[in-house]
Amino acid sequence: MNTPASSPVRERPADRATAPASDAAQERPADRVLVLNCGSSSVKFRLFDGDRVVDKGTVERIGEDGGGPADHETAVRGILGGLDLSGLAAVGHRVVHGGKRFGEPVLIDDAVLTAIRDLVPLAPLHNPANLAGIEVARAALPEVPQVAVFDTAFHHTLPEAAATYAIERDTAERYGIRRYGFHGTSHAYVSRRTAELLGRPYAEVNTITLHLGNGASACAVAGGRSVATSMGMSPLEGLVMGTRSGDLDPTVIFHLRREGGLSVDEIDDLLNHRSGLLGLTGANDMREVLTRRADGDPAATLAFDVYCRRITGYVGAYYALLGRVDAVTFTAGVGEHAAPVRAAALAGLDRLGIAVDPGRNAGTGDRVISPEGAEVTVCVVGTDEEREIALQTRAVVDAAG
């Protein structure tokens, strides 16, 4: 659930215990982790007690007119003030960009905070929000360990040939121009969950994960290691998204500047906020696009085809890079709920052993949707980035002793 108000809307977690805890459970040491996921205009939070979610919610429309909180500091203070934080072992923070420095989650100290701030030019919409959440939580809970979990960290295993852009080396090094990749916590969680569905060790499974939400990215995961991903220096590159263009000839930018007279900021806004499905149809919600397509709207039909064709191309390319693919897995809002997208995106890949069973595709929940005996298993897995952040946070705190 979401809310425009400054106070968070709480959701009753499905896995919250309703029966009284047993004596053994009551005697168990506190193992609570709070996860704060600060987006550019929202904050999601989830409070874990072991594997159980005991509280969660979202604050939206931060900094917007209409009743939302004035800023992220206000939103996070409101969240912390309304939670029972007794026995809290740690706070895990999602941080979008860790640059080349952070290849794993880390305990936050002043030096880490400074490093995250130095990376703001690479993620100007997100790292400042992440920093705001960290600073409020550290001030409110000075004795509780705080851990930064980076979206980019999972992709630190990318081979240099995958991370390097073919531009002048000195310029690239000076300005930090390389492929960083994003959605790392989602790709990590989903690829590991896929191995569980297959009943095989994670280190033995090659998976192509497709995170299809308002933001969208593909990732080739070889034995738990990211070896290719579609997002690049920023989340703009790659697949068609709700409002982002994805892959684009750079000449388009020069052309808009020279012939259209658009400023750099205007082009940035166009490609990040007025392109993708929104630019093609006027709607960034795939559900509306699918409804219009079913009604015969040519713009929606074209947008759907462009969207799915891009996915098909990445799946084929990543199949070639991996050499052997055990599974293709869809996740996030579109990936989990849009059966037509899943079917169209993998159509025509039968010779690669990839196919979708219509009956299974129409189901719900984590499941296999490929035909029985298919060479490549096609799965749908619900992503859980907050749970992945909690797992990584707990591991860092445990390792620190």
Image (cartoon, grey):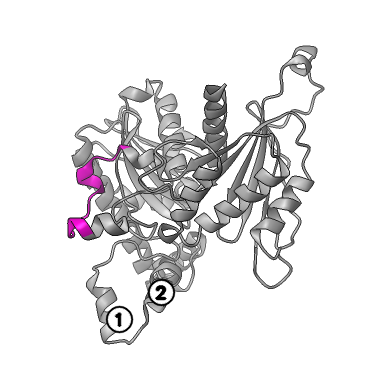
State whether residue 356 appears in this view. no
Whether the magenta-drawn stretch holds residue 73 is answered as no
Q: Which of marks 2 and 1 is nearer the N terminus?
A: 1
Q: How far from the left and from the top, in percent, is residue 32?
A: 68, 30
Look at 48% across and 45% down and name the residue there. 336
Question: CA separation, marks 2 and 1?
Answer: 10 Å
* Disc 2 crowd, CA 10 A, few/some/many (<14, 14-19, 20+): some
The disc labelled 2 sits on which kind of residue?
A: Leu
| Label drawn at residue 342 | none
Q: Residue furthest top?
A: 24
Find the magenta span and give its range.
157-170
Q: What element carries label 1?
A: helix
Front residue of 213/157: it is 157
The residue indicated by pointer 1 is 256
- Tell which of 332 and 380 is nearer to you: 332
Residue 197 drawn above or below residue 59: above
Check disc 1: other Cα within 10 Å, few if <14, some if 14-19, many if 20+. some
The picture quadrant where one finds residue 68 is: bottom right
Relative depth, front residue between 151 and 168: 168
Looking at this rendering, what residue extends furthest in the front direction?
111
Residue 270: mark: 2
Position in image of residue 358 (x %, y %):
40, 43
Residue at coordinates 36% horizontally, 49% vertically from top-left?
Answer: 181
Relative side of 398 to 305, left or right: right
The outermost residue toward the right is 20
> Residue at left 36%, top 83%?
262
Q: Where is residue 268 in the image (x, y as percent from the top left)?
A: 39, 72
Identity, as a three-letter code, of the amino acid under mark 1: Leu
Give the SS element for disc 2.
helix
C-beta proximity under 8 Å, tags 2 and 1: yes
